[in-house]
Amino acid sequence: MKKAYKSLILASCLLALVVVSLGAYTRLSNAGLGCPDWPGCYGFLTVPNETHELSVVEQNFPDAQVEPAKAWIEMIHRYFASFLGLLIVILCIIASKHRFNKQSDTQSLPFKHSVILLALVLLQGMLGMWTVTLNLQPFVVMGHLLGGFTILSLLVLLYLRTKARSTPANFAMHNGSFFMATFALGVLVIQIALGGWVAANYAAPHCSGLPICSNIELFSIESVFHLPIGQSNYEFGVLPFETRLSIHFLHRIWALVTALTIFWVSWKLYNKEQSEQIRGAIKLVCLVLVTQLLLGALIVHFQFPLLLTLFHNIMAAMLLLTMVRLCFLLTNRQGVAI
């Protein structure tokens, strides 16, 4: 049972990465309102294309125009997300079953972890609905993005816990290594949130040029706090140019802070830790970070091409996962079989 459980978690991790990638592609291809209702598409389980279906759409959505390409992008994302939700429900049921029977390995399945994942999936479903019904309100869009990243991270952490050959050590005895790593992780989470805020406000193209924006004289901290509220539709953004430029440039500034923090923490940990597995995890974090920085520069240089920007989103998720793995290894000195 435990082997099948671990395989199911691994499948869920891979599917969650696909869902996060599809969500990023949906945002970047401006397909977030490809279906103006939820959970279906114009009242159907698939994108309407038959004559009688289009007649129903015309009656129920008189101001809408069906764009099949965008609608299918949105629906495929929903299909995959729904399947991921089903897998997490199954994981929770299995953990619950083991918790309340008397098998010897009952404690080997993290019950509370599974329940938290289930609660997050339900919240993520609500955020997905509000993303559409509130017409891409940026706070909701950013929350939906962070929810996806959180679910992915918790699934990977669940996989690491089930693969562990020992229980977590008392990390307080390890000279602050865990706290240094979690501090760097917190800085990274802020950077991911800022990236989500850039995407939610369509602010990426408003800061061209390297290393600073070509219109940097328009930057102001006060402008960052110009919030997108009170609109009926937020598609393509509602904030003024200087606000979006400021949001993007703040993301770049914090990217520098994040990079310096992670490199500094990595250097300190690499010199302190003797475990080859932990040192390998540190090297992987740095490799992914360098890749992410190069991608960011290339995106601006080539004027924000969709595929590079999508890869930038995926690498942000990978950087987060490598940091989560490093933090886990620092609490589990005997390692995990991965």
Image (cartoon, helix red, strand yellow):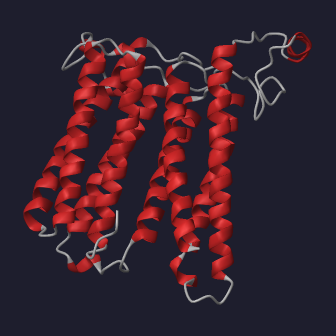
Give the left or right position of residue 65, taking residue 95 as reference. right
Point out residue 95 in the picture as x, y percentages from the top left corner: 62, 72
Give the left or right position of residue 241, taking residue 51 as reference. left
* Residue in view at x 27 percent, y 27 percent: 295
Q: Is residue 37 above or below residue 146?
A: above
* Residue in view at x 51 percent, y 65 percent: 6
Point out residue 117 in the picture as x, y percentages from the top left corner: 58, 59
Point out residue 317 in the picture as x, y percentages from the top left corner: 39, 42
Classify the position of the N terminus by image quarter.
bottom right
* Residue in view at x 85 percent, y 13 percent: 50
Res. 226 visible in picture: no
* Residue in view at x 63 percent, y 39 percent: 80
Q: In this view, does 114 lie above or below 228?
A: below
Q: Report the label total.
A: 0
User: Which residue is situated farthest in the left direction here?
Assistant: 271
Res. 71 visible in picture: yes
Q: Is residue 254 above or below residue 103?
A: above
Residue 309 picture quarter: top left
Compare residues 145 and 280 and report the one nearer the observer: 280
Point out residue 289 in the picture as x, y percentages from the top left corner: 24, 41
Classify the position of the C terminus by image quarter.
bottom left
Residue 211 picture quarter: top left
Compare residues 323 and 230 and report the one nearer the observer: 323
Compare residues 30 and 164 and report the one nearer the observer: 164
